[in-house]
Image: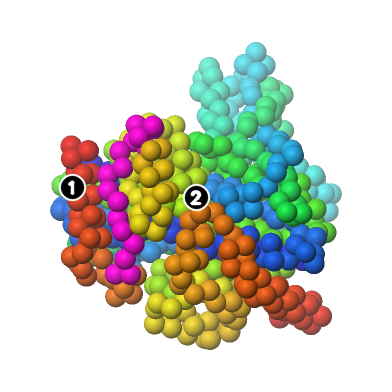
């Protein structure tokens, strides 16, 4: 089973939930943890993996052989991302705009285009307390997170029980991170920002056809608007974590919630069992 | 007209609460919400929308089954695994149009996506430009660029002195779209190990693009030891920590009222945010 942890709004507690969930399950299950927040990967701060392998992530970008090129302009014309511009005597390539689709090289009438590897980040594989740990990391100044997220997922074992720590937001990096999940946990906080962004995250998960449930973090403040929203949308609130200085202090020091307050382990194990139940019901009735 | 952007790397450090308060403190400015994935600034500024525009960007391939010969060429050349059983998965499709160009019977067409909306609004603090990216859509960087460009036009035509943007979390495409060419990036961090880790990465991006930065440590008193480490780190990097803002529930209370915190309290948080804006004005000069 693949469970991803997402949220529209950043800083609601995705990494706190994902790491404590994985650590709570590790004694009973063989777990794999994927940190797909490749712009700001943070799970390692809590899980302290020992990395055993590191590889660069590349996307293929065009390289033009000016000796063969007759500046016909075909490559510039077929590029949907304006990554290639052709002047009368030179072809300009903008690697940061290139998606690596390969169209320009395939369609060049002169066979003047080959592809070279453009490094956009790295992939690291290791182990943390018996949990297989994979993270991707976008290089500073690079724009394209989705190819790194794809690389993280490609190297992962798709048959293993997996917890995914997703990036914030609702656009391509989030979609890439959660799209194959069996279940998506959406972490929110009881503020108007939390509510607004939860509704966006729910819409994203639904668009992808992924069952989801809510985790309400820093509960205690607020006016019950999240609870009301969840009732209206028939969204289960699967776990509530109170606003608590002790929890904030553990977080600030990079200590996982279940390591600092072991009583939470039961809650996370129950959470996982509840997710399993929802997913099994979903697959036996096939249609939600 | 001078443009500043509020960024953080890590989400949830207080970008929007601070940017919303700047709206109340700064004079003669245009506000822009560049977090188009999850735009929240409007929740503090009570905007009345004057203009609403469609944002069309990107395309998705569609296969005409009547024309398709099922040769499989499109599937072979697609690098995004977007074609399965002679159908296009619109979620995986990047809109590169490669398949439509190689299909021997022209069975594949490209359809434009309605990728979002953007708005020009009035608030009692001045104009606000913001946007809503369509659910699960791509091209958030392009929408950020559009919001900035529209806000700039408005600010320049209207003779405004400042453009203040609330930026997105992360360090990738939308952040770089929000950051390039601004006069100053205010980096909001918090004294947590993750906040510190992410500050290093966003500061790296600022340095990469030669954008001057100021740092603000929000909720500094939740871990004084880490706050000390941030200050030491910034000193080594030659970046000024402009202010420290304490943790106070008044921020959440103001948020629940849908108002900038500086309007709800004259305590330490409000005083420090006001001082922070003054420092920004001095810094940009």
From what the image shows, is residue B265 above or below residue B198? below
Q: Mark on residue B193?
A: 2
* Quarter of the figure that contains the N terminus of chain A: bottom right
Residue at left offset 55%, top offset 28%: A93
Percent coordinates x, y for residue B82 in the rendering: 71, 53
Badge 1 element:
helix
Percent coordinates x, y for residue B214 in the rendering: 31, 41
Residue at left offset 31%, top offset 66%: B248
Using a 10 Å C-alpha cutoff, classify the residue at mark 1 as few (fewer than 14 neighbours), some (14 to 19) or many (20 or more). some
Percent coordinates x, y for residue A31 in the rendering: 76, 59
Range shown magenta: B234-250
Residue at left offset 35%, top offset 34%: B235
Query: What residue did someone put label 1 on?
Result: B278
**Distance CA(mark 2)–CA(mark 1):** 29 Å
Using a 10 Å C-alpha cutoff, classify the residue at mark 2 as few (fewer than 14 neighbours), some (14 to 19) or many (20 or more). many
Question: Chain under label 1?
Answer: B
């Amino acid at each position: 089973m693949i469970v991803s942890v997402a949220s529209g709004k950043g800083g609601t507690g995705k990494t706190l939930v994902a790491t404590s969930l994985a650590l709570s399950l590790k004694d009973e299950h063989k777990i794999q943890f994927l940190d797909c927040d490749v712009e700001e990967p943070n799970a390692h701060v809590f899980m302290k993996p020992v990395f055993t392998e590191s590889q660069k992530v590349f996307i293929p970008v065009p390289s033009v052989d000016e000796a063969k090129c007759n500046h016909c302009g075909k490559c510039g014309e077929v590029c949907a991302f304006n990554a290639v511009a052709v002047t009368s005597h030179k072809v300009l390539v903008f690697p940061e705009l290139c998606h690596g689709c390969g169209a320009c090289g395939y369609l060049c009438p002169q066979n003047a285009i080959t592809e070279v590897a453009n490094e956009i980040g790295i992939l690291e594989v290791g182990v943390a307390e018996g949990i297989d740990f994979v993270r991707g990391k976008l290089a500073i100044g690079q724009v394209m997170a989705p190819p790194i997220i794809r690389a993280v997922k490609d190297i992962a074992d798709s048959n293993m029980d997996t917890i995914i720590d997703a990036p914030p937001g609702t656009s391509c990096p989030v979609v890439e991170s959660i799209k194959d999940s069996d279940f998506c946990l959406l972490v929110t906080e009881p503020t108007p920002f939390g509510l607004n962004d939860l509704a966006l995250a729910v819409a994203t998960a639904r668009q992808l056809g992924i069952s989801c449930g809510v985790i309400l973090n820093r509960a205690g403040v607020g006016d019950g608007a999240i609870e009301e929203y969840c009732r209206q949308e028939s969204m289960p609130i699967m776990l509530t974590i109170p606003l608590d200085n002790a929890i904030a202090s553990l977080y600030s020091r990079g200590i996982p919630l279940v390591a600092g307050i072991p009583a939470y382990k039961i809650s996370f194990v129950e959470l996982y069992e509840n997710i399993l139940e929802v997913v099994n019901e979903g697959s036996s009735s096939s249609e939600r | 007209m001078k443009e500043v952007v509020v960024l953080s790397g890590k989400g949830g450090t207080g970008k929007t609460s601070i940017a919303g308060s700047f709206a109340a403190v700064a004079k003669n400015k245009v506000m822009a919400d560049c977090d188009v994935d999850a735009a929240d600034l409007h929740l503090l500024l009570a905007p009345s929308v004057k203009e609403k525009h469609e944002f069309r960007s990107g395309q998705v391939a569609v296969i005409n089954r009547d024309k398709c010969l099922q040769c499989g060429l499109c599937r072979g050349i697609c690098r995004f695994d977007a074609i399965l059983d002679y159908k296009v998965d619109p979620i995986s499709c990047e809109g590169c149009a490669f398949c439509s160009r190689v299909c021997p019977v022209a069975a594949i067409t490209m359809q434009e996506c309605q990728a979002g909306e953007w708005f020009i609004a009035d608030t009692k603090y001045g104009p606000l430009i913001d946007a809503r990216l369509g659910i699960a859509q791509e091209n958030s960087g392009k929408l950020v660029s559009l919001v900035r460009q529209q806000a700039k036009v408005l600010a320049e035509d209207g003779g405004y002195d400042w453009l203040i943007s609330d930026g997105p979390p992360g360090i990738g495409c939308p952040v770089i779209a929000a950051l390039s060419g601004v006069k100053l990036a205010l980096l909001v961090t918090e004294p947590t190990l993750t906040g510190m880790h992410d500050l290093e990465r966003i500061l790296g991006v600022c340095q990469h693009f030669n954008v001057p930065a100021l740092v603000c440590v929000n909720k500094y008193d939740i871990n004084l030891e880490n706050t000390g480490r941030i200050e030491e780190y910034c000193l080594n990097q030659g970046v000024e920590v402009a202010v420290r803002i304490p943790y106070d529930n008044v921020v959440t209370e103001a948020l629940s009222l849908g108002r900038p915190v500086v309007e709800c309290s004259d305590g330490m948080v409000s005083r420090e945010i006001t001082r922070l804006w003054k420092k920004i004005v001095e810094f940009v000069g």
